Image (cartoon, rainbow, N blue to C red):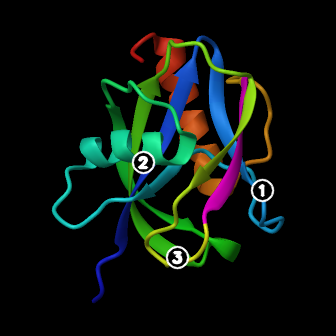
Amino acid sequence: MINPRSRVFLCITRRSNILVLDHVDQNNVPLQIPGGTIEVGEQPHIAAIREAQEETGLCGFEEARPLGRETVLVGPAASELVDGWFFHLRYDRDTPDRWIHAEDDASSGESDIRFELRWIPIQSEVQLGVSDLRFLDHLKRHLSRGDV
């Protein structure tokens, strides 16, 4: 049996907002939360901070709080099984409400991937992918208990 790829899913919050991203050049990719692949030999919490910086262009993340781990289906039509590690990262520094960031796509050798990032209220109803919505619901439960 092939082991699923390991990924981090990141809930980056600022006050009562969560950071989401759109792929600028790929209209077929839904709105999503930041995240990415855990490199071979990399600790998941280290991958969470690295991916947060790579996908957002923001610096200064100090802690990635684990929220859980589960196997999830991602990708077009939920076709890829991944070992998902879920983290919460707070970002208390000032940022624009919306910005464009280009991430170097070294893994595929393609040109940069451009993201439009924006802060939205955590309690808002957003059109995220299925696994991201489950994660957002999980975060809301933690917030309501005051343990995040």
Residue 37 seen in the figure: yes
Identified at 29% across, 79% down, the residue is 3
CA separation, marks 1 and 3?
Answer: 22 Å
Q: Amino acid at mark 2?
A: Glu
Q: Using the image as rendered, state which of residue 9 and residue 92 is in the foreground.
A: 92
Circle nearer the N terminus (1, 3): 1
Q: Is residue 33 left or right of residue 96?
A: left
Mark number, residue 80: 3
User: Circles 2 and 3: CB distance less than 8 Å?
Assistant: no
Residue where numbered disc 1 is placed: 24
**Mark 1, other Cα within 10 Å: few <14 / some 14–19 / many ≥20:** some
In the rendering, at what x and y percent does residue 146 appear?
A: 45, 10
Q: Using the image as rendered, state which of residue 35 and residue 100 is in the foreground.
A: 100
CA separation, marks 2 and 3?
Answer: 20 Å
Identified at 35% across, 49% down, the residue is 69
Residue at far right of view: 27
Mark number, residue 51: 2
SS for dot 2? helix
**Mark 3, other Cα within 10 Å: few <14 / some 14–19 / many ≥20:** few
In the rendering, at what x and y percent does residue 104 appear?
A: 52, 60
In the rendering, at what x and y percent does residue 134 appear?
A: 59, 45
Q: Nearer the viewer, mark 2 or mark 3?
A: 2
Residue 68 seen in the figure: no
Query: Does the segment drawn in magenta span residue 2?
Result: no
CA separation, marks 1 and 2?
Answer: 18 Å
**Mark 2, other Cα within 10 Å: few <14 / some 14–19 / many ≥20:** many
Q: In this rendering, is residue 95 above or below 139?
A: above
Magenta region, residue range: 112-120
Identified at 49% across, 20% down, the residue is 91
In the rendering, at what x and y percent does residue 74 appear?
A: 57, 67
